[in-house]
C-alpha cells in the first residue's frame, strides 16, 4: 500500500515542562487511537521560555524523557517525531542543541538532527537571538528509510534555506518534516509560501507541526500546522487550537508527479 496516514500535533507550549510533557503524551495516545503510522510534534514542544529553563530542562537523546516516548512508540507500534527538544551539551553549561529525534515503531531512535540555521532577528516589536542559548549542529540533515517513505529532517528557520531541502531531495527524501515555532508576524507573511515552495520545488511531502498562540505576554506563535503535497497543494491545515490534524502520504502520487514533471537533482556530499 502506497498511502500512509500521519498525525501532526499543534501545541502552545509554556515554561511548565511537566504540563507540556503530559499534553504531548495525551496526543500520542490520541494519535495511536486514530491508527496513524506516525505522529510528529512541533519545535521545542516540551519547553518555550527563557535561558534558565532551557538549561534546566535540557536532556539527552538517550535520557529518561526521550525514553518515555520510545516506550510509547513501541507500545503503540507507531513512529514518533520529537519535533525538537533542548539537548544537553556535555561540558557546556551555557548552551544547548535544538534537536529533532525520530523514533521508529519498535522504540529505536532512527535518526537525529541538530538545527543548523538559527533564528537571530530584530523585528519591529520583537528581538530574538537564538544563538545566545542554542549551539548550531555540525551535520547536514539526514534522510532515513521508514514505512511512510524516505524521511528527511529539518527544523523551523531551515525553511528559508532551499539548499538544505535540495540536499535532502538529492539523497532521496520523499517526506520532509519541518517542525516549527514561527512568530506570528513572520508566519502571517511567509509560512504558507515557504511550505509550498519547499514542497513543490523538491517534489516532496512537507509536514510542518507547529506551535500556535500566545506563550507569554511578549511572544505568540503563528500555528497553522500543515501538510503540503509534492504538487504544492495544501492538503491539511490546523485551526487555532491545540490538537492533531491528519493527512495521507501517497507515494504513488509522489512518483506520478516526479514522472510527469521530471527534474534534474544534484546530489550534495
Image (spheres, rainbow, N blue to C red):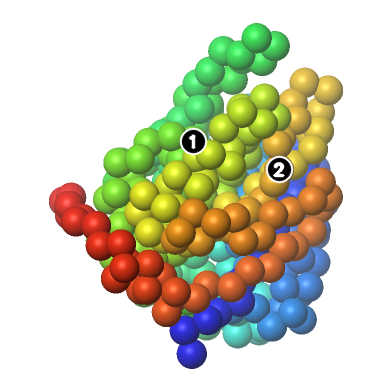
Relative to 51, residue 2 above or below: below
Circle number at residue 223: 2
x and y, in percent, of residue 20 in the image = 77, 51
Q: Quadrant of residue 180?
A: top right
| Residue drawn 79% across the image and 38% down it | 213
* Sequence-wise first label, 2 or 1: 1
Label 2 secondary element: loop
Specify whether residue 187 is in view: yes
| Residue drawn 44% across the image and 53% down it | 199
| Residue drawn 58% across the image and 42% down it | 192
x and y, in percent, of residue 103 in the image = 51, 70
Viewer-proximal residue, 60 or 263? Answer: 263
Residue count near mark 2 (Cα–Cα under 10 Å), binned few <14, some 14–19, many ≥20: many
Circle number at residue 93: none
Q: Are marks 2 and 1 in contact (CB under 8 Å)?
A: no
| Residue drawn 75% across the image and 62% down it | 244
x and y, in percent, of residue 194 in the image = 50, 40
Is 109 on the left-hand or right-hand side of 138? Answer: right
Relative to 251, residue 51 above or below: above
What is the CA distance from the residue labelled 2 to the residue labelled 1?
14 Å
Q: Quadrant of residue 212?
A: top right
Is 17 on the left-hand or right-hand side of 137? Answer: right
Is 149 on the left-hand or right-hand side of 106? Answer: left
Label 1 secondary element: helix
Tell me the residue that label 1 is attached to.
157
Which residue is at the far top?
124
x and y, in percent, of residue 241 in the image = 83, 50
Viewer-proximal residue, 127 or 91? Answer: 127
Specify whether residue 71 is in view: no
Amino acid at each position: 500500500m502506497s498511502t500512509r496516514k500521519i498525525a501532526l500535533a499543534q501545541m502552545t507550549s509554556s515554561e511548565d515542562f511537566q504540563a507540556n510533557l503530559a499534553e504531548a503524551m495525551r496526543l500520542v495516545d490520541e494519535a495511536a487511537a486514530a491508527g496513524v503510522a506516525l505522529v510528529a510534534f512541533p519545535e521545542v514542544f516540551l519547553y518555550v521560555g527563557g535561558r534558565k529553563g532551557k538549561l534546566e530542562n535540557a536532556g539527552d537523546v538517550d535520557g529518561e524523557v526521550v525514553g518515555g516516548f520510545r516506550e510509547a512508540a513501541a507500545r503503540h507500534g507507531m513512529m514518533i517525531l520529537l519535533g525538537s527538544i533542548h539537548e544537553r551539551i556535555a561540558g557546556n553549561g551555557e548552551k544547548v542543541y535544538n534537536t529533532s529525534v525520530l523514533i521508529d515503531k519498535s522504540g529505536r531512535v532512527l535518526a537525529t538532527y541538530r538545527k543548523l540555521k538559527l533564528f537571530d532577528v530584530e523585528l519591529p516589536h520583537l528581538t530574538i537571538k537564538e544563538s545566545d542559548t542554542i549551539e548550531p549542529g555540525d551535520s547536514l540533515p539526514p534522510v532515513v528509510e521508514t514505512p511512510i517513505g524516505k524521511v528527511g529532517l529539518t527544523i523551523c528557520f531551515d525553511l528559508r534555506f532551499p539548499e538544505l531541502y535540495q540536499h535532502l531531495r538529492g539523497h532521496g527524501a520523499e517526506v520532509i518534516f519541518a517542525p516549527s515555532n514561527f512568530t506570528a508576524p513572520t508566519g502571517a507573511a511567509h509560512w504558507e509560501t515557504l511550505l509550498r515552495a519547499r514542497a513543490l520545488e523538491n517534489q516532496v511531502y512537507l509536514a510542518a507541526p507547529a506551535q500556535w498562540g500566545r506563550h507569554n505576554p511578549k511572544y505568540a506563535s503563528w500555528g497553522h500546522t500543515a501538510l503540503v503535497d509534492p504538487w504544492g497543494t495544501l492538503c491539511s491545515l490546523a485551526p487555532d487550537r491545540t490538537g492533531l490534524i491528519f493527512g495521507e502520504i501517497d507515494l504513488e502520487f509522489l512518483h506520478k508527479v516526479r514522472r510527469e514533471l521530471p527534474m534534474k537533482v544534484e546530489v550534495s556530499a
